[in-house]
Image: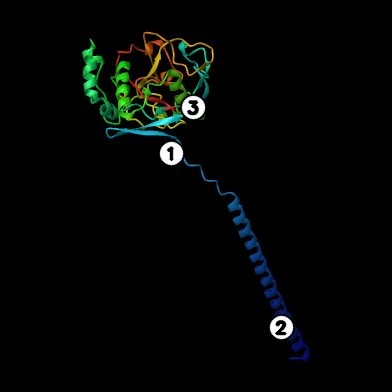
Amino acid sequence: MTDSTTIDIMNTMHIKKLFMAAVLVLSSFAVQAQDVIISRKTTTTTTTSTTTVPKPKPNKPSPTDFPGQTFTVNGVSFKMILVEGGTFTMGATDEDGEEEEEPTHRVTLSSYYISETEVTQALWEAVMGTTISQQHEKALSNKSNTKDYPLYNVGDNHPMYYVSWDECQSFIQRLDSLTGRKFHLPTEAEWEFAARGGKRSKNNMYSGGNLYTIRKVMWCESYNKKGELITGPHPVKTKAPNELGIYDMSGNVAEWCQDWFGPYTSSSQTNPTGPETGTKRVTRGGDWMTYPHGCRVAFRREDVNYEPFYSSFRIGFRLALNTEQ
């Protein structure tokens, strides 16, 4: 092998070593660059995920969000919810109402309390000492067609029914003597203002809901899978409450009010109590047999108001109380 050949081989080996060194250097730069890119991507991803975390949803109102007073009578407790005074439009507002719901008019009410639920069978028995079965028997003795007056769901937490307006007054008198307070049936205006949600009102057609949430907020006319009517009042507080935390003001059982039934006027009123005389007492709210239209918070019609002595499996009541006491 000549000297020139040896030099060429050495030069070639040297070039290869320089090439390999250059490759290693470039590889090192590439790894560092990749690390930087990955680091930037990680930082960016972290920043992005931090800014897109959804805000926690507010908790649903708890019972403590609705101020009131709780009473206990012979072991049975019931709550009266505070309704802060305010002014509202009474009557058919946005919906196609009945003739008796017009004209709409402005009503101003002082603060008052209204019961969280309809008076239950347990509370009635605690105050009056009589059961729903005894009330049913009394109702049957006053009816000519007993087949039209069945006894439906019985239970402590079911609303009381088969009670006339007159019997509601007897209940209230006895409750007053047991508690030292002065309860009353809500006036028609007090009833509607509370049903609408008072000063928290969302202007719903039904108490606590609208056409899309009917089944969540009220027991009205409904049928099972066989097409049979689901009969009888249901336990209280099994549907969602309205804005004030009050249950079943639409549906379940209709409710006696203090007022005589009479036509509306367009004039503004303050703490109205209805006509001075009349033949029928007001009932409001509809019941478990009523189609949804009849369970609206504004619904009133002359043929669903009754004489003070009348009782039915479709009518119960709730209580009201002035705040001054």
Left/right of residue 89 with respect to residue 130 in the rendered view: right
Task: Find the distance from the CA under tag 1 to the CA under tag 3.
Answer: 17 Å
- Say how the picture is coloured: rainbow
Please provide percent x and percent y for residue 46.
59, 56
Specify which label sits upstream in the sequence, 1 or 3. Answer: 1
In the rendered image, the quadrant that contains the N terminus is: bottom right
Name which residue lies at 49% across and 27% down: 198
Q: Is 163 in front, or is 47?
A: 163
Q: Secondary structure at mark 2?
A: helix
Residue 174 at what x, y percent from top left? 29, 24
Between the C-alphas of marks 2 and 1, the distance is: 88 Å
Could you tell me if the residues under marks 1 and 3 are in contact, i.e. CB atoms within 8 Å? no
SS at badge 3: helix
| Residue at 44% from the left image edge and 22% from the top image edge | 190
Q: What residue is pinned by disc 2?
A: 13
Amino acid type, callout 3: Gly
Q: Where residue 161 sits in the image (x, y, percent)?
A: 30, 22
